[in-house]
Image (spheres, rainbow, N blue to C red):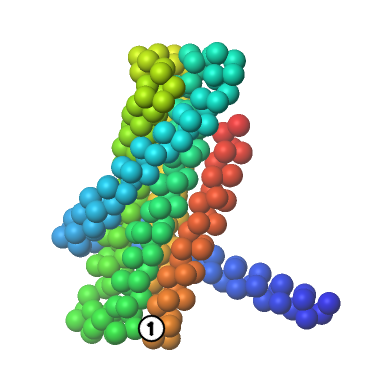
Amino acid sequence: MMHFLRNLGARALGALHDIGQLTVLLFRILVSIPRLDVQELWRNFYKVGVKSFPIVFVTAILTGAIMVIQSGQLVAQYDAFGLLGWGAGYATLREIGPILIGLMFSGRVGANNTAELGTMKITEQVDALRALAINPIPYLLAPRFIAIISMMFLLTLIGNMMAILGGALTAQLLLEVDYRLFFWSISEYLVLGDLWNGLVKAFFFGVAIAIVSCHYGYATSGGAVGVGRAVNSSVVVSAISIFVLNFSIGALTL
């Protein structure tokens, strides 16, 4: 029993230590934003946003299609096809879209960011920047932080549109529900707050992915094995953060 309590206490202290480090790093990044490297920011916009667009496009189209297929079984049972667009759109805009894109983003962008920073750390490139009187925070971390948050927000907005389009096409082709009825249902029953709810979640998901991936990459030690551990921790903590934030925002907006 004492061994279990010691392990539990050690894990709790470790979690609090990580939260403290994340908070300090977040403050340092926010303070350094006015001095960030603009060229590095644009490179990260391309790397994070443009290169992530194809997978977001496919994910969003399939998400909308799946929502229609699942909702279609229920609306067909009650012959309520006028609610098909509302049911699929509501679930996609508020919950499924931001979560799926966030998880994809943490797996692709967050892991890649952690691996890059971790490799730079263990190969002493970060120390070389300091030797050249270049602060790594505004040069390396701040551009990545801003790019991840911005692109997560924008790609979720684009993904929402693609998901609705995918849902309309699936309703037309598989369920023979006219696309005009589908879009009428969305415009009639969904409100702007449903869209903003998902976008607010996307913003906070982006903050979580950005700060977690930067923290674990910047704190990497232990050679190649350390990079692997950092990437694994980054993906796991980002995924947990996404679900915790989703629950918290959902509870606050009841």
**43 with respect to 146 (left or right):** left
- The residue under label 1 is 224
Residue 241 x %, y %: 52, 55
Looking at the image, which is closer to me, 228 or 2?
228
Q: Nearer the viewer, residue 76 or 248?
A: 76
The residue depicted at 65 percent of the width and 73 percent of the height is 11
Residue drawn at x 41%, y 17% is 177
Q: Give the vertical position of 51 relative to 193 (above or below).
A: below
Residue 122 showing in the rendered view = yes
User: What x and y, as percent, mark residue 236?
Assistant: 51, 63
Kindly indicate the quadrant of the structure image that contains residue 135. Answer: bottom left
**Residue 45 image offset from top left, x and y in percent:** 23, 53
- Does 219 appear above or below 178? below
Q: Residue at x 36, y 31 (%)?
A: 166
Residue at left offset 31%, top offset 37%? 158
Quarter holding the C terminus? top right
